[in-house]
Amino acid sequence: METQANNYLNLLNFRVVDMLLSADLSHIDKVLSLVAFNRVPLGPNCLVGIMTYEGVSIPVIDIAIRLELENIAPYTLETPIIVCSHKGNSVGLIASSIYGVAATAPDALQLGEIFEDGAPPCKGVVKTANGQSFLLDLDRMLDVDLSALEDKLSSPASAGYQIKGP
């Protein structure tokens, strides 16, 4: 996890259904309002589609479905898509709302040991202005392989991913 010279972690804080989540800002490219995306036939449930970002097709994953949460609301024009970099590729993550950016000390990460087995894909818990937030482990969250869908996808950015369970 990258830190700045002041040794603080810069985090994007957001909500997915009723969960507070955070992601390391160094992996976040941009937050967009919902854009048109194309559904992927025979794709995994959490892969809700493909969208164009900076001229390249990228996968769009619904975090709520990926984490097997309940009470998922329908998408609106205000639904945010968090565009992340992962292993040289971009991927869009659908959240419910964005709270903003905050810095936290790296030693503020708590309960990391209970997440070491990989389920759910978190590094631990951090305290934010909005309450306790799960810090997503984007490597595990985005451990995705769309190679089985390569015939349906035209972009090299979508190759090399495999979606696994939470």
Image (cartoon, helix red, strand yellow):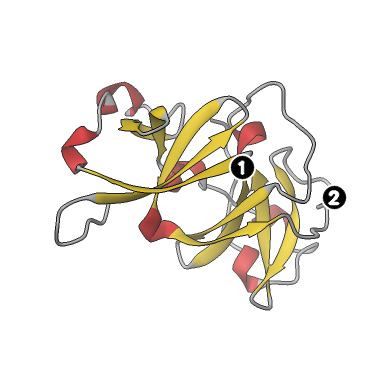
User: Which residue type carries mark 2?
Assistant: Pro
| Residue 41, numbered circle | 2
Element type where label 1 sits in the image: loop
Residue identifier under label 1: 95
Provide residue 155's location: percent of width, then percent of height: 69, 72
Quarter of the rendering containing residue 134? top left
From the viewer's perspective, is residue 142 above or below residue 35? above
**Pointer 2 with pointer 1, Cβ within 8 A:** no
Provide residue 5's location: percent of width, then percent of height: 15, 62
From the viewer's perspective, is residue 67 above or below residue 7? above
Estimate how packed mark 2 is, as few (under 14), some (14 to 19) or many (20 or more) residues with alpha carbons within 10 Å: few
Provide residue 121's location: percent of width, then percent of height: 45, 34
Element type where label 2 sits in the image: loop
From the viewer's perspective, is residue 130 above or below residue 26? above
User: Which residue type carries mark 1?
Assistant: Ala
Of the pair 94 and 44, the residue shown nearer to us: 94
User: Which residue: 82% across, 45% down?
Assistant: 42
Estimate how packed mark 1 is, as few (under 14), some (14 to 19) or many (20 or more) residues with alpha carbons within 10 Å: many
Left or right of 20 in this view: 71: right
- The span from disc 2 to disc 1 (Cα, nearest Å) is 22 Å
Left or right of 97 in this view: 55: right
Left or right of 106 in this view: 66: right
User: Which residue: 39% across, 55% down?
Assistant: 25
Provide residue 164's location: percent of width, then percent of height: 57, 38
User: Which residue: 63% across, 24% down?
Assistant: 69
Q: Nearer the viewer, mark 2 or mark 1?
A: 1
| Residue 76, numbered circle | none
Quarter of the rendering containing residue 38? bottom right
Q: Residue furthest front?
A: 129
Left or right of 72 in this view: 111: left
Quarter of the rendering containing residue 153? bottom right
For marks 2 and 1 on the same chain, the one whose residue lies earlier in the sequence: 2
